[in-house]
Amino acid sequence: MDALRSPAAAFARDGYVVLPGVLDTATVARARGWCDAVLARWRAAHPDAGDTTNIAWLTEPRWWDDPAELAGFLDLIAGDDILDLLTEIGAPPLFNNTQYFPEPLAKSWPGVWHRDCQFLFPARDDAGEARIRASFGSAHVRYALVDEACLEVVPGSHLRPDTPAEAAVRWDETARTGAMPGAEMVAVAAGDVVLLHAWALHRGHYRTDEPRRTLDVIWQWGGKLDDFVPPPTCFTDAALQARLSPGARAAFARYVETYAADWDAGEHAWAEAAMA
């Protein structure tokens, strides 16, 4: 009940909160249709990618035939209710990326425990992670498009460094897919949204016999991160932006204003290569 009364407070305390029934049945079906179509095109374009369980940059125009559908997708992921909640949590959020998680086709595997901030460093850097936690915030907005229980989180871990027991799991190559002290499995129904702090200890589970269709939208606070310039994808298309609702248009305008100079300088080349 606490999450329903005050999702921002629950998120601040636990590093995640489940928002039940955010999407109605028709919207779930529409969103899944869009995302599955992108997934099918991505797989066709990457026949050697193997049994992927995550694709990114769904906003890349080449995955969409109809600009109206892409505009509908952008309006969905930057809906007023979600943006209002993210603003209540911190400040007007800065868009970062989109991801889509399907179940594996051939092989089940447990995900590795991590905090997203670790991926900003080439090797373990506890001081760097502490600096990121103090300066920046980031949240995954995860839309469940099927009933699923694929996410594990350690509540409250976004507020602090690892305990010795947690560090032993996260940084040991032989232990990082094992049990984590204090972890909770997050079960959701189609249409629910999970707001997950990206700095929290978490992992996904990937099972061939358990359907998974998670649309994941990443937002951040605190400005842009050093050495991370996401790609422009569709966001420099003025005609597309004109189709959007006022709130979504303003949110993505912040994204363009933040990164336009970096895009002009080619600082997103790494992301372009990753999308190829």
Image (cartoon, grey):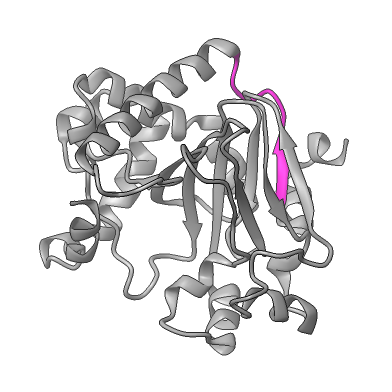
Residue extending farthest to the top is: 26
Q: Is residue 54 magenta?
A: no
Q: Is residue 35 above or below residue 163?
A: above
Residue found 56% across the figure and 34% down from its top: 212
Residue extending farthest to the front is: 106
Residue 269 in the figure: left or right of residue 105? left
Residue 191 visible within the image: yes
Residue found 86% across the figure and 41% down from its top: 2
Which residue occupies the foreground of this view, 107 or 256? 107
* Magenta range: 16-24
Could you say which quadrant of the image residue 243 lies in? Answer: top left
Residue 249 in the image, given as x and y percentages of width and height? 33, 35
Which residue occupies the foreground of this view, 70 or 48? 48
Residue 51 in the image, given as x and y percentages of width and height? 40, 45
Could you say which quadrant of the image residue 13 lies in? Answer: bottom right
Q: Is residue 183 above or below residue 236?
A: below
Could you say which quadrant of the image residue 71 lies in? Answer: top left
Quadrant, the N terminus: top right
Residue 161 visible within the image: no
Residue 136 in the figure: left or right of residue 6? left
Residue 156 in the figure: left or right of residue 102? right
Residue 144 in the image, given as x and y percentages of width and height? 59, 31
Residue found 22% across the figure and 39% down from its top: 234
Q: Is residue 20 magenta?
A: yes
Q: How many marks?
A: 0
Residue found 36% across the figure and 39% down from its top: 250
Residue 170 in the image, given as x and y percentages of width and height? 65, 74
